[in-house]
Image: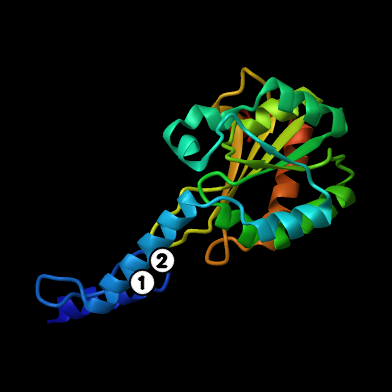
Amino acid sequence: MKDREKDEQLAEHLSKFTPARINVGKAGNRPRTSTWLQFRADHALAKDAVSSNFSESFLKTFAAQYELPVMETLAKSREEFLLNPPLGKKTSNDILDGIVKILPTDRDVLIVISDGLSSLAVEENLPDLYPMLLDGFEQAGISTSKSLIVKQGRVAIADQVAHAVGARVALNLIGERPGLSTASSLSAYITYMPGPQTISSDRTVISNIHKGGTPAVEAGAFIVKTIERILEKKASGVRLQALG
């Protein structure tokens, strides 16, 4: 009995530090009704997040507030974006030429805001994260190009646009693949001197940005500090790690 009590105490202790489904118990050979219903609800939220586009209210309020241009990738629909991932990594030459005409060139940072696999993550976290980034970059003396919003965008789309406008760092704020613990986790993918040659290991990633993980305001301060270091060391990804 003592060993069993210890196990129960350990499970109860661990459950306080993770949203994972541990120590939820069971009814015979089946999950408890409350556990099963919560699983179904979380699964539905994850599916909705993956299949959803930016809401019109977000585009009309956030994008309009900061006067951010909105562009599309080669993926013309959510279905196409999900079934053919490479289409979300690039945009057409015509769209890129139009973006280059309106974005300032030769800046330290270009912020790209992509829906990725959870537009919900963007809509929930950007209102707190984005102004923190703007203030942080200004205080740090880091110049920024005009940010833009990308529909049906994946991580690499920021490399193409940043390279075209001559930004030294691409910062892609993108919704991550939802799990059963959260459907609104945002990540920041940061690349020094991005371009056609960029690969995944060239990127520094700050992930798990959401109300149950790293709060958006705290993440914003950390992103600014990270980019300061990237600009100083002139490296990101595994090369930055190798520099210690």
Say left or right for 181 vs 173. left
* Label 2 secondary element: loop
Quadrant of res 153: top right
- Counting from the top left corner in percent of width and height, residue 141 is at 90, 44
Q: Which residue is drawn at 72% across and 28% down?
A: 95
Query: Label 1 amino acid?
Result: Ser
What crowding class fits label 2: few (fewer than 14 Cα within 10 Å), some (14-19), or many (20 or more)? few
The residues tagged by marks 1 and 2 sit, at their Cα atoms, a distance apart of: 6 Å
Quadrant of res 46: bottom left
Query: Label 2 amino acid?
Result: Thr
* Label 1 secondary element: helix
- Counting from the top left corner in percent of width and height, residue 66 is at 82, 53
Say left or right for 187 vs 96. left
With respect to residue 163, does 82 lie above or below? below
Q: Which residue is drawn at 38% across and 61% down?
A: 44
Q: Please state, as top left, top right, bottom left or bottom right, where the N terminus lies in the image.
A: bottom left
Q: Are marks 1 and 2 in contact (CB under 8 Å)?
A: yes
Counting every numbered tag in the picture gives: 2
Q: Which residue lies furthest to the top in this view?
A: 197
